[in-house]
Amino acid sequence: MSGKLDLIATAPMGLEAVVARELKDLGYTETVVENGRVNFKGDLIDICRCNLWLRTSDRILIKMGEFKAVTFDELFEGTKALPWQDWIPSHGEFPVEGRSHKSQLSSVPACQGIVKKAIVEKLKESYHTEWFQENGPRYVIEIILLNDMALLTLDTTGPALHKRGYRKVATEAPLKETMAAALILLSRWNQNPSRPFYDPCCGSGTLPIEAALIAWNIAPGLRRSFNAESWPEIPEKLWQQAREEAIDASRDDIELNITGSDIDPVAIEIANASAKSAGLAKEIKFEVMPAARIRPEGDYGCMITNPPYGERIGEEKEIRRLISQLGRVTAELPTWSFFAITPTKQFEHDFGRKADKRRKLFNGRIECQYLQYLGPLPPRH
């Protein structure tokens, strides 16, 4: 591959700025933020590094091309003109996925078929064959039509990046790992991760586990594989180099004070199993405890939680009681900061005070507010 690649880190709605900040922290200074994605440039090694390191992005895509397409002929010719042979080998598997919004070419299956046909024709010219078995490495292609502009990408990731590999079982209505990491990064707890961290509605333990991964600078993708690892275009030594860099960058010299509690004993069992799978069983304390009885220890801590929603689980009356209990508990923790993601409109009323800051986020498809109650920062030593 000659020259820099056009890469895309996809972002859940509302988290584009968080993904962009992550990329900047990794050294990618020239980023362009758009709805649902952050564009940046990189080399083959950067595909490996970003898949391993990005905590809040869903996928790393290669941008193959973008062009106007209001007819099937334009879509076919535009697709065929792209250098698919640079990536897809003669035995490669290349399924086509698609989306269309505010475009004249609105039939997604028809667009997928046209794109597939165009790529087959291009590969026929390159490999001088009429038949492709598609029994090799997997190259997922996506056609996105927006306002009559066609964007074609190759997915380097495979299963989305929130699938870290440590969660074997999930509780009902779990928080995605990418969202959990975003809530922690937005809280700025990671700037001083020796501070206490507590989740009083921890469910399967995602927030405490992600906090520990962040605190010790453990790359979230270290325990999983990616589609592009089987691509001959990306040498195995680059993946090995990126993994070795990640292992060397991790640090376990920070003493952690991370706790999660939940009223459900089954959830705590799952949380303990997930922490063990992540290699963090000794670093996180999980306990069965109703919210009214929690007594977090230490000063200048962060409490971050995803309390149950009436739309999904539990009865509204119980949930409102839980929120008021959390309000009473945190009122007795004057140096602590409290953060909650919730769609519940009366949360602040039940909690007993207005949030200092709010941020609109989407937990799955549910519109939520990330409510932030900011306590004092720890004194500088």
Image: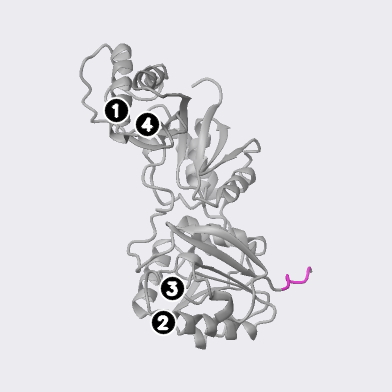
- Residue 9 point in image, percent of width and height: 51, 41
Lower position in the chain sequence, tag 2 or tag 4:
4
Mark 3 to mark 2 CA distance (whole Å): 12 Å
Q: Start and end of the magenta stretch? A: 376-380
Lower position in the chain sequence, tag 3 or tag 4:
4
Residue bearing mark 4:
231
Asked if residue 379 lies in the magenta stretch, the reply is yes
Q: Tags 2 and 4 in contact by the CB under 8 Å rule?
A: no
Mark 1 to mark 4 CA distance (whole Å): 9 Å
Residue 92: which disc?
A: 1
Lower position in the chain sequence, tag 3 or tag 1:
1
Color scheme of the displayed model: one colour
Residue bearing mark 2:
263
Q: Check disc 1: other Cα within 10 Å, few if <14, some if 14-19, many if 20+.
A: some
Residue 94 can be seen in this image: no
- What amino acid does circle 3 point to? Pro
Q: Tags 3 and 1 in contact by the CB under 8 Å rule?
A: no
Report the residue at 34% width, 32% height from top.
139
- What amino acid does circle 4 point to? Trp
Residue bearing mark 3:
308
- Indicate whether 180 appears above or below 83: below
Frontmost residue, 299 versus 82: 82
Q: Main secondary structure of the magenta part?
A: loop
Lower position in the chain sequence, tag 1 or tag 4:
1
Lower position in the chain sequence, tag 3 or tag 2:
2
- 2 vs 1, front mark: 2
- What amino acid does circle 2 point to? Ile
- 3 vs 4, front mark: 3
